[in-house]
Image (tube, rainbow, N blue to C red):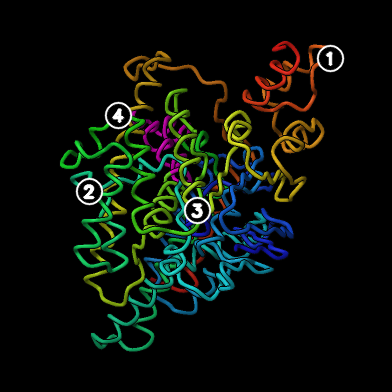
Amino acid sequence: MIEVKDLAFSYDGEKEVLKDISLRIEEASYIAIMGDNGAGKSTLVKHFNGLLRPTRGTVLVDGLDTSEETVSSLSRKVALVFQYPESMFFSETVHDEMAFALRNFGFNDKVVEDGVRKYLTLFGLRRYEDRSPFTLSGGEQRRLALACVLTWGPKYVVLDEPTAGQDQLQREILVGIVRQLVTQGKTVVVVSHDVEFVAETSPYVFLMADGELVDQGEAQPVLSNERSVEKAGLILPQVTAAFREVKGLSQNIVSTAQAADEIFRLYGG
Amino acid sequence: MYKLTSAFIYQPKLTFLHRLDPRAKLFMVAAFFATSFLIGNLYYLVLLLELEALIAVSASTLKRWTRSIAAVAPFFLFIFIVNYLTEQGLVGSFLPAIKLIILVGIFSLFFITTAPDMFALMLDKLGLPQIISLAFSMALRFVPVLAQQTQDIIDAQRSRGLSVDSRNPLKRIRALVPIFIPIIILSIKRSIEVAEALESRAFDPSRPRSSWIELKMGRWDWAFAASNGVFVVLSIFVFGL
């Protein structure tokens, strides 16, 4: 479990970008942290693997105080995938790019090879193994970046703006990957301001604005709450807005699956 | 990274120093540069540093100025130790080290109080080709962007188990490869994008450009520039060369 208690943080020692945040992320749960640009979402998740240390308060990962642990040791538990992770590539081949973290963590050659091959296959990248990561398409690079952090089997996977710069097809693939990770029992934390993506995948949602938590709860009630969504600098999901235009339809629909159910209930006989 | 780069990044304020023509401030930089090199008196150099601190206070930027000084502290120590080991004596070792601090401090004051656009206009006025002044001002403007990008890359690679603070110097050098390669690639990509964006907005360095703001030395600018000249003469007169 990740437990954040009264967390405050400032980059420059003057302006606080996180103000007394408290939250709990249970094991094997799927969480979305949402808010406008500058809300403090990325700053918050950088505390989970010790990249940032609290100015005040504590962050506990499985009972370990992140202020007292190294980034390397925390990263074994918490994998953080940055926005545009493909921009961090540097190896000559896809294989080496995937093996990089495993070697850093000191795994033996057999574990490195097994881990790389397993995730190359799972993410459909096996045929690119010997190619330079820079020659892959945008979508393949994003999949590779995700595969890179899953090789060492982290318990918590944090995805920072995973849909940024992705087309509709890649977003669908991402939805599939997130669902797969949740099914595997990983704790998945998605940082995003993409309401459509979050609504479709139905996580537990934390809404942030100006470094504070403004609302939290299941996706449906939170994302259909106009006041909370607006406060977090977001807009209602398109399907919610569309359903509110039609009298007699449910006002709290946030995903296409819920919309289909509602339409079936009304008109499906 | 943020703290280090912010020590040299323009901070908009309305103080006297901020409102001065950048050419007038260039006189201040030249005066500090010249006197710190011409006068090898330790007391004078300490006074010069104190004067810089006072200017930083008057420009409401003491904190950032202090950061710029802190940023060169390792170099200060290095110069001091090397000189001390080559038998320059305590004072002889201290002199070049404090000169470094004075120079970094005065350049930091100049850049903290001068907007990149003003800096570009100043270079234009000084007769530099437009392409050079644009390159300089854009380089300045991109410092925070590059710093943020570098920090993101370091964070990402540390999250993949890269150890950047190993005690083994060889390991530390090897750890730079996964950081520098993405920085170089991203910087080249960004420079190509910026060049294309400039060209698509009709930028042509071979033709003269008009400017919304024209630099003009006012009464206070001339007075400030002249006071720096007087300061240099007085310093040499009182402390000697």
Q: Which mark is residue B61?
A: none
Of pointers 4 and 3, the one earlier in the residue sequence: 4
Which quarter of the image is occupied by the C terminus of chain A? Answer: top right
Position in image of residue B195 (x %, y %): 35, 25
Residue B137 lies in magenta, yes or no? yes
Q: Residue at x 47, y 29 (%)?
A: A171
Structural crowding at the residue carrying mark 1, measured as other residues with C-alpha within 10 Å and reported as few (<14), some (14–19) or many (≥20):
few
Reply above or below: A228 against B180: above
Q: Amino acid at mark 4?
A: Ser
In the image, is B78 to the left or to the right of A24?
Answer: left
Q: Which mark is residue A186?
A: 3
Chain at tag 4: A
In the image, is A161 to the left or to the right of B124?
Answer: right
Of pointers 3 and 2, the one earlier in the residue sequence: 2
Q: Which residue is mark 2?
A: A91
Reply above or below: B44 against A167: below
In this view of the protein, can residue B23 be seen by the observer? Answer: yes
Q: Amino acid at mark 3?
A: Lys
Of pointers 1 and 2, the one earlier in the residue sequence: 2
Structural crowding at the residue carrying mark 3, measured as other residues with C-alpha within 10 Å and reported as few (<14), some (14–19) or many (≥20):
many
Q: Are marks 2 and 4 in contact (CB under 8 Å)?
A: no
| Badges 1 and 3, same chain | yes
- Magenta residues, dominant SS class: helix
Secondary structure beneath label 2: loop
Secondary structure beneath label 1: loop
What's drawn in magenta, residue-wise? Answer: B120-145
Structural crowding at the residue carrying mark 2, measured as other residues with C-alpha within 10 Å and reported as few (<14), some (14–19) or many (≥20):
some
- The image quarter in which residue A47 lies: bottom right
